[in-house]
Amino acid sequence: MKARAASLLVLALGAGAGVHAADGAERTIQRPAGGWTHSGLIETTQHVEYAYPNNLIDRGGQRGRTLIEGRLKQLGTHRQPPTLVVNGNAMPLYSDEQGRFARPYSFGPGSNGIELRGTDGKVVQRTQFYEANALKTQAKVRVILAWDDPQAELDLHVLTPDGGHAFFANPILANGGGLDVDSVDGAGPEMFSLAAPVAGVYHVYVNYWGNFGAEGYHFDESTRQQPVISARITLVFDENTGAEKRETFTVPMRKIGDLTLVRSFRRG
C-alpha cells in the first residue's frame, strides 16, 4: 500500500460513532476530546482494539494503550504521508485504503498533546487533553521508535542494568518496565516505559527484522518503499515534569538484519 497525501477530517482518541457533516464528509466523534479525561474507570480488557492499516497479528488489547483514531480525506496516491506528533514525538501517519488510521500510544498522567501536520509541515489539527487518573504511573524513562516505511517491521530492544531485555518476545520485565506499545503493523510506534529505573547503564537497540505485505511477513528486500529506512528514536526522561529531558536520534536501516546500538545511558 502506498501512503496517501491527505487532509485531516478527524483526529480523536478511542472508540466512537460516525456522523456526517453538512458537506457529506464522514467525521468521527471519539474519546477523549480536548479537556479533562479520566481513563481506567471501566475495565475493558475483554475488548480487543485494533490498529490499522495492515495489522497482521492479533496480540489482544495492550493494557494501558490508547488508539489515536481518525480519518484522512484521500487526495490521490503519494508517497509522502502527513505527520502525527504526540507529546512532541513525530511519526509518519499512514492510512488504509479508506483513509482510516489508528495508531497505538501509551499516555501518562498530566497534559498530553496531539498534532496532525500536513505534507507541507503546517498544523492541520491540534488536540490537548489532561489525563487526571492518579493511578496511572509516570514514566521516568520512555523510549519511542517510529520509522518511515509502512512495509518494514522494525523492533525496539532495551537492555536494563539488572539483566532485563525488553523486546517483542519478552515485552514485560521483572523490574516493572516493558513495551507498552509493540507495533506490528508498520511505521510504529514501539514504546518502552519504566517508572522506577534501577541504577546502572541502559542500552537501546533497533533491529530491522523484516518486511510484510498482503501475504504476511517475509524477508524480500525488494518490497519495502524506501531504499534506506529512517528510524527515529526518542528518549524521554522524567516525562511531563519540570525536569523532563529528551534526546532524538535518526538511524539509517539499510538491510534486513541490521542491528544498531542507538544510545547507552546511565540512570541513578
Image (tube, rainbow, N blue to C red):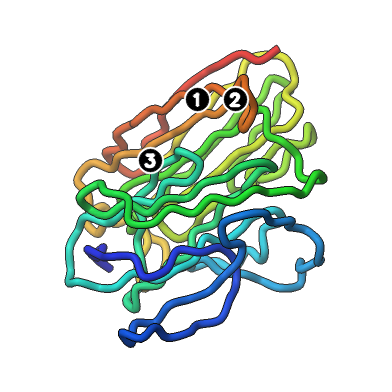
Q: Nearer the viewer, mark 3 or mark 1?
A: 1
The answer to which of marks 1 and 2 sits earlier in the sequence is 2
**Labelled pair 1, 2 in contact (Cβ < 8 Å):** yes
Closer to the camera in the image, 36 or 244: 36
Kindly tell me whether residue 219 is visible in this rendering.
no
Q: Tag 3, which secondary structure?
A: loop
Residue labelled with disc 3: 257
Q: Is residue 170 left or right of residue 12?
A: right
Counting from the top left corner in percent of width and height, residue 77 is at 18, 69
Q: Is residue 22 at all visible to an observer of this figure?
A: yes
Q: Which residue is more in the foreground, 37 or 190?
A: 37
The x, y position of residue 37, in whole percent, is: 69, 56
Q: Quadrant of the C terminus?
A: top right
Mark 2 is on which residue type? Phe
Residue 86, relative to residue 140: is it above or below? Answer: below
Hey, what amino acid is under mark 1?
Answer: Arg
For residue 120, above or below residue 77? above
Q: Which residue does the image show at 67% across and 41% down from the upper left?
A: 110
- Residue 135's mark? none
Q: Label 2, on which residue?
A: 237
Describe residue 259's horizontal placement relative to residue 3 as left or right: right
Q: Which residue is mark 1?
A: 246
* Identity, as a three-letter code, of the amino acid under mark 3: Gly
Q: Earlier in the sequence, mark 3 or mark 1?
A: 1
In the displayed structure image, the side of residue 217 where residue 43 appears, left or right: right
